[in-house]
Image (tube, rainbow, N blue to C red):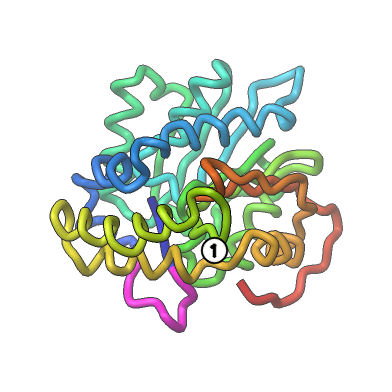
Amino acid sequence: MALAEPLAARSDGSGAMFDRIATRYDLLNRLNSLGFDRAWRRVTAEALAPAAAADRPLRVLDVASGTGDLAIAIARRFPSAVVSGVDTSAAMTGIGQGKVESAGLAERVTLASGDAQELGFPDRSFDAAAIAFGIRNVPDRVRALREMARVTRPGGRVAVLELSEPASGPLAALARFHIRVLVPLIGALVAGGAEYRYLRRSIRAFPPPDQFARTMTAAGLAPVETRPLTFGVCNLFLASPVVGHATGDAGS
């Protein structure tokens, strides 16, 4: 779950940090999300359906793929899909590739080293691009979103799944307690306190949904939908590339 904060306030969130916690990463995801992260990924995979073409397999890029859970969810949802995953943590992708092979998906899912800010793929080479719990870790979010827009074909879909700290609603107070108190405690017990104090800060620092949607627009993406999940504890942002859009700098 790649979770970061703006570069100026960033103490970690790098591939090296995730290398250190790679073997405990999946367990931490389950504990920190109370098990909801799997369902959120399935919702994200389903949301890519409008990008599917009738005449060929769905081509999907999974950015900041970590240990491959989203890539696997996409491949299972679309039986002919071809999924390419990239991540800055070699330890994470190594574990993920093992999971892909165990799932019998090695012919359709590949995970490799790659940077969200400089994707090594041609323009318009995918029907969809997705990033789950990874945009926080990218120092230049606008640049990463531009790259996702660049490699996605016109009419395709870009999906960003990210945790948030809800400001209001029936579970807002409980969610804030979980993020501010329980997440660092779980992290300290399972992985190490420094990494998960960082996780707590990163969630609190992430912009509100309407502000992040504007960032996507500035990066050359036309918003389709912002979908709150589990009372706003997580948000799914859906967009499509704007053909010929001239992007400018924008805050993230």
Answer yes or no: is residue 146 visible. Answer: no
Q: Position of residue 56 (x, y in %)?
A: 70, 20
7 is higher (above) or lower (below) than 40:
below
- Residue at which label 1 appears: 117
* Lateral position of residue 53 relative to residue 168, left or right: right
Give whichever of 231, 41 is nearer the camera.
231
Above or below residue 56? Residue 214 is below
Q: Nearer the viewer, residue 20 or 46?
A: 46
Q: Residue furthest bottom?
A: 8
Determine the main secondary structure of the stretch shown in magenta.
loop
Tell me the kind of residue under disc 1: Gln
Residue in the picture at 34% in, 64% down:
180
Q: Is residue 164 left or right of residue 28?
A: right
The part of the image, by quadrant, that contains residue 194 is: bottom left
Position of 63 with respect to 238 (left or right) is: left
Q: Position of residue 246 (x, y in %)?
A: 82, 67
Q: Which residues are magenta?
A: 5-13
Image quadrant assignment for residue 43:
top right
**Residue 222: percent from left, percent from top:** 79, 53
Q: Confirm whether the magenta stretch covers residue 8.
A: yes
Instruction: Tell whether 154 sits left or right of 95.
Output: right
Q: Is residue 56 magenta?
A: no
Q: Residue at 39% across / 77% down in the picture?
A: 10
